[in-house]
Image (cartoon, helix red, strand yellow):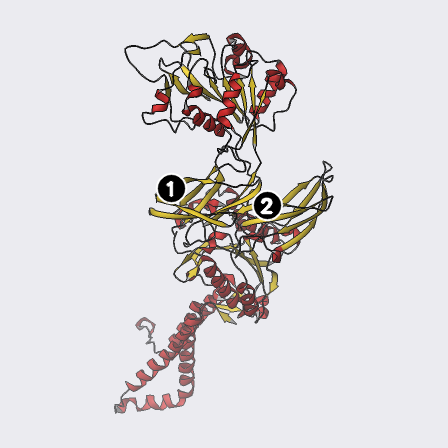
């Protein structure tokens, strides 16, 4: 026998109250001589034994009534034998523990994960004190999707005995939050699958989590699973382990800026810091590393509440190959998202194709000089000059951009090749000139807006000199190509003179929802530079020449700056295959003609983000469907740089690096409130408590709650007490009954 509220058993002392009342009544009696009552006293002496027995029974029943009220409030629970006799059943307890990295959120001297472990320990300790038949299952969110290995749970239907609290404590002591972002969905579905609805037993599911808003924004899958559990008679306990939503700064992105990247040439990377708190943050320092070597830090002056700020910084590596860049901010309540890693694979140079329609390649030579000046100035760009016929049968995939310079005509295969290249994220730059045939461009390249070229053409037109108002011939917009010139009077652009250009129809303008935009205009507002999005790629067209034939721009320093910015803009977006999210599997495709099947992986640890020998794993690559080799490793468990060691067929070692980072959205520590949760879970029966307030309720324990039986027994005692009190008291005869 046990009690749901054992502290209330102190109330059993109230059983003495009827005895005290009886003794007080005895003290109130006085002996009064009265001759007329002598014969009555004699009769009383003859019946005193029976009267005292009645009074004793009455006193005992009143004491039992008081004891019954106290026991009813304490809620007694029947043990196994009595439970079976009265209909009791075994109880299955399933605890789902959120170990996503937001549970590492710290405040005061505790964390969300510490509070979760405390409440789970209280549950285990309470259950181990009960003599009833119970089982206990503990499943962490991060292991919920790994049922294939056969052991996803830390405890699975463990029989609860008197020493279970200690076994649970030993297991909880070694647990830490993972670095993964995991929603409750997989864990709830696992619990739903474990519950055998045919078994005659009680079931309680405890969802121990921090209830972050991002996990419950799209709550339909969670609601469906919880609804199924509720319909199956499962008691749901939702336990929140955080006291409030805390502020958090996080590095949410670290990636190269779209542009030219090559060994020996500086390029830009961008780091983004997000403020997930409700207060602004000022003077946030960002520490930077290149290949594990510190470099000058940068400072973000201000980040508003709920805002993100991005800053660019220059990066330089002398050698080709894979290099690492890391960014970190100072520690805060959630430390794991304060650092981010990136792996950059730098080629020795960046090839670009210059297709010139002029026999002397005049335009190509000027553009090549701007893209690759040579000497001490290294841009990493390697221009390749070819005639238009090159496009007919040569692949374009290796080029970071293609330029058409004063091309008058292209064959059909060349047009198809260009369209395919740009559609697949390639960049195309176009300059017009004397060889330009507007009819060809309009019919084959523009095609009423459906083709590559961004605007229709009329013909060669002279930009007349304005002798009344002296102004710059070029008017540029705030676009990446011209941003360095925009916003102020620029002496270099003022010196650019445009004599001839190819005009567009006077009434032509891109529509408001068009992917075509005018980036620069001439003094007479005719379009000079027009951009168009085509598939995944970009096309930028100038209506004048690249060489100083129709203009003097090619001799102006601004031409070099604009062309380098244009190349950066046209280059495909950075390949981010080497940058992945913690929790995703590590897979590598190999060419069996070049590599041996054995691959060695060096992984970082939770405390060291660099790969180490102590975390080495060796896997044998297996044949894939396409005839290649595929090496598969377990999911990445920590953020950092992972190193793969490949062995070539001639026994040489090649290294490949992968950067894994935590999921940025998990750093948003906003929580879903009790009222919002009630709205989302409308129609579902559940109990919601803060971790420090939660205690195991009587409904969670095995055995039978005897409260209902106590009510029936108390009612019988009270009825018996009233009947006995009536029998033991004096009742005068009714006057109408006298003869």
Residue 657 numbered mark, or none: 2
Q: Nearer the viewer, residue 187 or 251?
A: 251
Residue 626, compared with residue 436, is above or below; it is below
**Residue 40 visible in the snapshot:** yes
Q: Secondary structure at mark 2?
A: strand
- Binning the other alpha carbons within 10 Å of mark 1 as few (below 14), some (14 to 19) or many (20 upward) gives some
Left or right, residue 703 beside residue 626: left
Q: Quadrant of the C terminus?
A: bottom left
Location of residue 83 (image quadrant): bottom right
Residue 700 numbered mark, or none: none
**Residue 232 visible in the snapshot:** no
Q: Nearer the viewer, residue 573 or 367?
A: 367
Residue under label 1 = 307
Q: x, y percentage for residue 666?
A: 47, 47
C-beta proximity under 8 Å, tags 2 and 1: no
Mark before the other along the chain sequence, 2 or 1 = 1
Q: Nearer the viewer, mark 2 or mark 1?
A: 2
Q: Secondary structure at mark 1?
A: loop
Q: x, y percentage for residue 650?
A: 74, 44
């Amino acid at each position: 026998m046990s009690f749901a509220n054992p502290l209330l058993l102190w109330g059993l002392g109230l059983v003495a109250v009827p005895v005290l009342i009886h003794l007080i009544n005895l003290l109130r009696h006085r002996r009064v001589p009265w001759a007329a009552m002598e014969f009555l006293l004699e009769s009383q002496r003859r019946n005193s034994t029976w009267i005292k027995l009645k009074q004793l029974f009455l006193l005992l029943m009143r004491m039992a009534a008081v004891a019954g009220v106290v026991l009813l409030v304490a809620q007694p629970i029947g043990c196994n034998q009595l439970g079976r006799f009265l209909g009791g059943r075994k109880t299955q307890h399933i605890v789902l523990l959120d170990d996503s990295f937001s549970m590492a959120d710290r405040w005061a001297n505790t964390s969300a994960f510490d509070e979760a472990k405390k409440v789970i320990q209280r549950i285990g300790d309470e259950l181990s004190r009960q003599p009833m038949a119970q089982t206990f299952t503990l499943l962490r969110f991060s292991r919920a999707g790994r049922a294939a290995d056969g052991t996803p749970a830390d405890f699975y239907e463990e029989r609860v005995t008197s020493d279970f609290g200690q076994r649970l404590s030993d297991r909880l002591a070694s647990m830490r939050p993972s670095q993964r972002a995991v929603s409750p969905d997989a864990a709830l579905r696992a619990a739903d699958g474990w519950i055998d609805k045919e078994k005659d037993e009680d079931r309680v599911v405890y969802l121990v989590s921090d209830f972050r808003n991002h996990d419950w924004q799209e709550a339909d899958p969670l609601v469906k699973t919880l609804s199924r559990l509720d319909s199956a008679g499962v008691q749901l306990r939702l336990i929140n382990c955080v006291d409030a939503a805390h502020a958090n700064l996080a590095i949410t992105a670290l990636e190269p800026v779209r542009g030219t990247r090559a060994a020996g040439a500086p390029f830009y990377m961008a780091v983004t810091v997000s403020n997930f708190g409700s207060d602004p943050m000022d003077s946030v320092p960002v520490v930077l590393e290149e290949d594990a070597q510190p470099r000058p830090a940068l400072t973000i002056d201000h980040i508003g509440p709920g805002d993100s700020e991005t800053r660019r910084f220059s990066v330089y590596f002398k050698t080709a190959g894979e290099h690492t860049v890391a960014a970190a901010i100072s520690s805060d309540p959630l430390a794991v998202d304060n650092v981010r890693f990136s792996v950059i694979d730098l080629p020795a140079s960046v090839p670009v194709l210059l297709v010139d329609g002029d026999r002397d390649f005049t335009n190509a030579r000027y553009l090549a000089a701007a893209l690759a000046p040579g000497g001490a100035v290294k841009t990493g760009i390697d221009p390749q000059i070819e005639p238009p016929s090159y496009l007919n049968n040569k692949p374009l995939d290796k080029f970071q951009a293609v330029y058409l310079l004063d091309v008058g005509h292209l064959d059909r295969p060349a047009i198809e090749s260009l369209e395919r290249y740009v559609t697949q994220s390639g960049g195309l730059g176009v300059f017009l000139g004397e060889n330009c045939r507007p009819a060809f461009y309009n019919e084959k390249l523009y095609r009423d807006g459906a083709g590559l070229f961004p605007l229709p053409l009329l013909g060669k037109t002279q930009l007349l000199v304005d002798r009344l108002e002296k102004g710059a011939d070029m008017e540029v917009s705030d676009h990446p190509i011209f941003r360095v010139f925009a916003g102020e009077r620029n002496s270099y652009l003022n010196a650019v003179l445009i004599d001839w250009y190819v005009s567009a129809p006077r009434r032509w303008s891109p529509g408001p929802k068009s992917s075509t935009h005018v980036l620069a205009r001439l003094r007479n507002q005719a379009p000079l530079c027009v951009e168009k999005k085509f598939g995944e790629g970009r096309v930028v067209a100038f209506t004048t020449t690249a060489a100083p034939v129709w203009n003097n721009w090619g001799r102006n320093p601004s031409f070099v700056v604009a062309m380098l910015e244009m190349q950066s803009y046209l280059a495909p977006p950075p390949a981010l295959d080497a940058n992945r999210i913690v929790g995703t599997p590590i897979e590598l495709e190999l060419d069996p003609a070049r590599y041996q099947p054995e691959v060695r992986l060096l992984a970082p640890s939770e405390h060291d983000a660099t790969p180490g020998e102590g975390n080495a794993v060796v896997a044998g690559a297996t044949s894939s469907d396409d005839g290649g080799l595929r090496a598969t490793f377990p999911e990445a468990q920590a953020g950092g740089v992972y190193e793969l060691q490949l062995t070539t067929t001639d026994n040489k070692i090649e290294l490949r690096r992968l950067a894994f980072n935590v999921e940025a959205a998990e750093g948003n520590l906003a929580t879903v409130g009790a009222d919002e949760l009630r709205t989302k879970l409308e129609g579902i029966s559940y109990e919601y408590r803060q971790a420090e307030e939660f205690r195991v309720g009587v409904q969670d324990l095995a055995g039978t709650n005897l409260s209902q039986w106590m009510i029936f027994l108390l009612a019988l005692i009270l009825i018996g007490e009233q009947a006995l009190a009536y029998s033991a008291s004096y009742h005068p005869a009714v006057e109408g009954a006298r003869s």
